[in-house]
Structure formats: structure tokens, C-alpha cells
Amino acid sequence: MKLYTKTGDKGKTSVIGARVDKDDTRVEAYGTVDELNCFIGQAISVMTDDAHPLKPILQHIQHALFDLGVDLATVAPQAYKIQDVHVAHLESRIDALSEQTPAITYFILPGGTPLAAALHVSRAVCRRAERAIVRLSKEHPVQPEGLQYINRLSDFLFAAARWVNHSEQVPDIRYESNPPQSS
């Protein structure tokens, strides 16, 4: 079986239940979720310890993101794969990580260890995916749990990045207003 089909050569693609333009808001939404999944995979790849405690959590999230992509790629109403239990799972993980890090009393800049930086990049892509899903929801029905999941996921990725830095004894990078420099 060949990897290429040539069915998209004229700017159309198949979603579950229809053929649409490749720049359709539905394709943009699930495509951005796929991009997020790739960045999370990249974050996993910088883990130097195969037994890293975040690895199974992030891999579970990757599977959930694939399910969310299927939900977004389906035209007809359906029994969605992402449900309240997925949102609740992320919330419990956020709470657990947040309990292990200092309280936030200021804005922080993304960075720190390579893993924390990769999680911050994933968080930023997650926010873009959320915006794409919101755009899609203005044109087509989108299940609320999918939107809630992607919103909580960006919070989880932020909490995870802080937890990684804290675990490695790398302090948060405090944001400081940068006044214009005089010439």
C-alpha cells in the first residue's frame, strides 16, 4: 500500500463524513491539535530518564489528543471520545503538580530545563489549538468537553513545566517590565 493517495492534490481532503477544502476551519482545528501532539512527543523525546514520572501522563495525553482530533474531524453529531472524565483527570494532575511547586506571585517567562521549555512550547501551541477550536465552534457544533479539555491541557502543560523546573532546582524566570532603552 502506498502512503500517498493523490486525492488531496487539488486542495481538498476527507474528514469523517465529507470532503472539504484543506483550509477549512475543521481541518485547521484538528491539524493544530495534531501539531500539539507532535510537540508533546518532542517534549517526551528530551526526557533523559525513561522512568520520568511525566512520561506516561504525556503519552496518555497524546492518545486523548488523537481522540480529540477524531472528534473534531467528524462532521455528523456523534458520541464523542473526549468526555468529562478526561477533563477531571487533567484537573487532578494540575492540582497534584501545583501542590509541589511554590505559589505563583508574579508572571513567569517560559524556559528553564530543555523539558520545561518544550512543555512551554507545547502550552503555546495548545492555546493556538484552543483558538482554532473556538473558531470552528462558531461555524459547527463542537462538544463542550473537547473545548474544556484543550483549555485544561494548556494549564496542565504550564503546571508541568513549572514542576519540571522546580524538580531540577531551576527557579522560575520572573517577568520584569522592560522599559524602552534610550539612545
Image (cartoon, grey):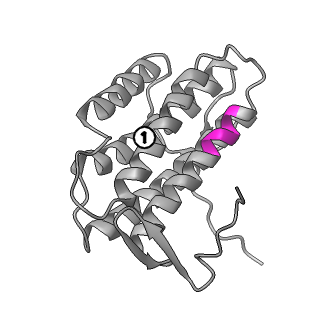
Label 1: state its secondary structure. Answer: helix
| Percent x, y of residue 2 | 72, 60
Judging depth in this view, the residue of 95 and 71 nearest the camera is 71
Taking the magenta stretch, the answer to whether it contains residue 166 is no
Q: How crowded is mark 1: few (under 14 residues within 10 Å), some or many (20 or more)?
A: many
Q: Residue 28, percent across and down?
A: 47, 68
Picture quadrant where residue 17 is located: bottom left
Type of the residue with mark 1: Leu
Q: Quadrant of the C terminus?
A: bottom right
Front residue (pair 102, 100) = 100
Q: Which residue lies furthest to the front in this view?
A: 1
Residue drawn at point x = 57 percent, y = 46 percent: 37
Whether residue 174 is visible, yes or no, is no
Taking the spot 59% from the left edge, 50% from the top edge, the residue there is 176
Q: Which residue is drawn at 72% across and 17% down?
A: 50
- Vertical side of 31 occupied by 175: above or below: above
Q: Name the residue rendered at 51%, 60% in the picture.
A: 32
Residue beneath label 1, please?
Answer: 153
Residue furthest to the top in view is 51
Q: With respect to residue 46, does 79 lie above or below?
A: below
Q: Is residue 25 above or below residue 163?
A: below
Q: How many marks?
A: 1
The percent coordinates of residue 132 (x first, y second) are: 41, 65
In the displayed structure image, the side of residue 67 where residue 41 appears, left or right: right
Q: In the shown orientation, is residue 183 left or right of residue 96?
A: right
Q: Quadrant of the N terminus?
A: bottom right
Residue 6 on image: x %, y %: 65, 75
Query: From this viewpoint, is residue 25 visible?
Result: yes
Give 125 or 10, whichever is nearer the viewer.
Answer: 10
- Magenta residues (range): 39-44
